Image: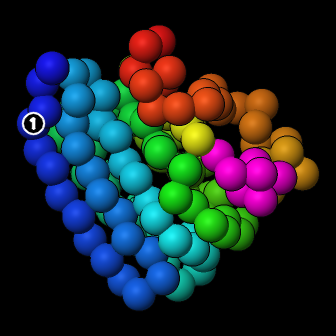
């Protein structure tokens, strides 16, 4: 199992960890994803695509809240990854976060998995 880069950033209500596993970049936001914390997630997602790691897995299992700004970060990452020939997978969404995707219809444009391991298997 290839585990290349590992990183972590923190801004109060949101902490974001990243790691490379095989051909996937796994990004794990923990806490609240909103207008004030969105850049903390946007930056590692954009950086991964710029560095050629275009298969992104966002581990949402620690995400307690996601507003429209957070949703837009994920949608933007999806567009960037797809333009580069990649994709974004979401894993482990809690019901409160999944509801935002359901209400907005965004669930239809992402591949959603129960766990990160499930996402790595595809």
Instruction: State yes or no: residue 95 in magenta.
Output: yes
- Image coordinates of residue 91 in percent, x first then y, are 55, 37
48 or 26: nearer the eye?
Answer: 26
Identify the residue shown where x is 66% and y is 69%.
Answer: 65
- The residue segment tinted magenta is 93-99
Q: Residues within 10 Å of mark 1 (few under 14, many from 20)?
A: few
22 or 45: nearer the eye?
Answer: 22
* In the rendered image, the vertical position of residue 32 relative to residue 88, given as above or below: below
The image quarter in which residue 90 lies: top right
Identify the residue shown where x is 15% and y is 50%.
Answer: 6
Left or right, 24 with respect to 30, comes to left
Is residue 87 among the parts visible in the rendering? no
- Image coordinates of residue 39 in percent, x first then y, are 42, 72
Total of numbered circles in the picture? 1
Q: Quadrant of the N terminus?
A: top left
Q: How is the image coloured?
A: rainbow
121 or 101: nearer the eye?
Answer: 121
Q: Residue furthest right?
A: 103
* In the rendered image, the vertical position of residue 76 relative to residue 113, given as above or below: below
Identify the residue shown where x is 30% and y is 37%.
Answer: 25
Left or right, 13 with respect to 9, comes to right
* In the rendered image, the vertical position of residue 52 relative to residue 103, given as above or below: above
Most common SS among magenta residues: helix
Identify the residue shown where x is 27% and y is 51%.
Answer: 18
SS under mark 1: strand
Please give the residue where the numbered disc 1 appears in the rendered image: 4
Left or right, 41 with respect to 78, comes to left
The image quarter in which residue 92 lies: top right
- Image coordinates of residue 42 in percent, x first then y, are 42, 61
Is residue 120 among the parts visible in the rendering? yes
Left or right, 100 with respect to 40, comes to right
Instruction: State yes or no: residue 26 in magenta.
Output: no
């Amino acid at each position: 199992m290839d585990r290349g880069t590992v990183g972590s950033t923190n801004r109060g209500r949101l902490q974001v960890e990243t790691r490379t596993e095989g051909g996937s970049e796994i990004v794990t936001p923990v806490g609240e994803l909103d207008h004030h914390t969105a850049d903390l997630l946007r930056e590692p997602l954009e950086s991964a695509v710029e560095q050629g790691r275009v298969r992104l897995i966002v581990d949402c299992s620690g995400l307690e809240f996601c507003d429209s700004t957070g949703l837009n970060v994920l949608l933007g990452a999806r567009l960037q990854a797809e333009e580069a020939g990649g994709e974004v997978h979401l894993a482990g969404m809690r019901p409160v976060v999944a509801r935002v995707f359901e209400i907005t219809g965004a669930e239809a444009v992402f591949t959603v998995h129960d766990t990160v391991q499930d996402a790595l298997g595809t």
